[in-house]
Amino acid sequence: MRRLAALGLMLLLGLLGAPASAQSDDLDAIARDYVRLQLEIGARDDGYIDAYYGPPEIRAAATANPRGLDELARAVEGLRGRLRTVPPNGGLSQRRGAFLEAQLNAASHRLRMLRGERLSFAEEARGLYGVEVEGLLHPLTHYDPVLARIERLVPGTGPLPERVEDLLARFTIPRERLEAVMRAAIAECRRRTIAYLPLPRDEAFTLEFVTNQPWSGYNWYQGNYRSLIQVNTDQPARLSRAVDLGCHEGYPGHHAYNVLLEQALARGRGWVEYQVYPLYSPQSLIAEGSANYGVPLAFPGRDRLQFETRVLYPLAGLSTRGAATYLALQQAMEALSGARFTIARELLEGRITREEAIALAQRYQLMTRSRAEQSVRFTERYRAYVINYGLGRDMVAAHIERQGRTPYVRWMAMRRLLSEPVLPVDLLPRAPR
């Protein structure tokens, strides 16, 4: 009787670990079981599912009585075994199978972590996001020359983080003007994006302002070409944040990415696996990397400075005096992004304390105490996920810029990245034959 009850539950969820003889075990069948399995894992791991827009009854069935972590791990391996029996067909179909395998491999590693296994920072990055970080993480002294260059941009006698903060504070958007500035920036990011990437006519987003979050902005994709974009106002919003957020969370970032996946793959090809987005997966490196690269793609050269001084500064009620220096400082500070990975690794592997991590973020990321605390809270919650921002951006940038120099060629490369099955390994240069 217990065996029959268990079988009945598995049939309800569509999660049989191995194909029955009467089952048509193709990629479509595997994808349906993959969706249910990911949703069931999400019921055991709060925040694991970043987005789901498939039929609500599938989520309800998958989360009504989720199996234990050990059973879920066995189900993941069973589904991977089934996937290996599907013969490669080449083209997008083969890339679809590779995507499913990579996502399931990440699910396997996440379940290991949920069951208490301690992975190194490099193992997390490899297992969850499909990238190697060994050799890419530098000792913090590596960033001392960058700090020296920033010293020359912000001359003075006080500590460098304080001088940087004094300069940045001059470009803070007043709270009562924040929504107008953000909407104008997102609208311009959208205008520049749809000039190259046609989007469905009914795509749209809702903008909200929130507090008490470990992140500064978030896109919650809701399906039917709709997103909820939230901006965290715990910290003062600098003017540069408007374009950064408009591109990253909106266009051509997370909103456009999810819209194009839904249009081209979930609806266009009926690939239901794209109706669910597990956060701790290789898909996140593509999502975060393309969202960050979207900023220089949409605003090349001096375009950003010209737009900000012409439109955003007046909306914010800020003087444009020093705008070029402010932008140069922002760009110089991007060279410190790798310091975040090193600090995260040292913290997560127990070689430094939380307080030491905060102090190092203040020094090597030139943050105020409160911003450093927020950064460390993010690392404590999302762990090795932090590598998706800087490393992801660098990988996406290198891949797209290898395709050519003209804006059209680069936007078309971005379009393929946002609307096809793409894994981090696909961003690497191909070895000559």
Image: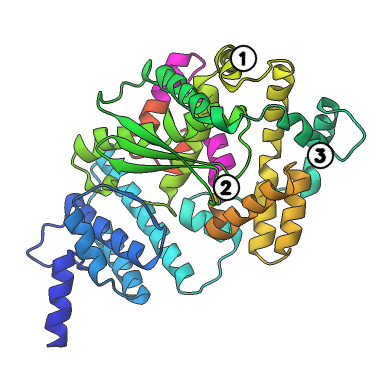
Q: How far is disc 2 from disc 1 in space, using C-alphas?
A: 32 Å
Tag 1 secondary structure: helix
Q: How far is disc 3 from disc 2 in space, using C-alphas?
A: 27 Å
Q: Residue at x 41, y 17 (%)?
A: 191
Image vertical order of residue 344 relative to residue 395, above or below: below
Identity, as a three-letter code, of the amino acid under mark 1? Thr
Residue that protrudes farthest toward the left in the picture: 22
Tag 2 secondary structure: helix
Magenta segment includes 401: yes
Q: Residue at x 29, y 64 (%)?
A: 40
Earlier residue among tags 3 and 1: 3
Q: Residue at x 35, y 33 (%)?
A: 205
Q: Which mark is residue 162?
A: 3
Q: Which mark is residue 309?
A: 1
Earlier residue among tags 3 and 2: 3
Identity, as a three-letter code, of the amino acid under mark 3? Glu
Please report the bounds of the magenta region as a residue range: 386-413
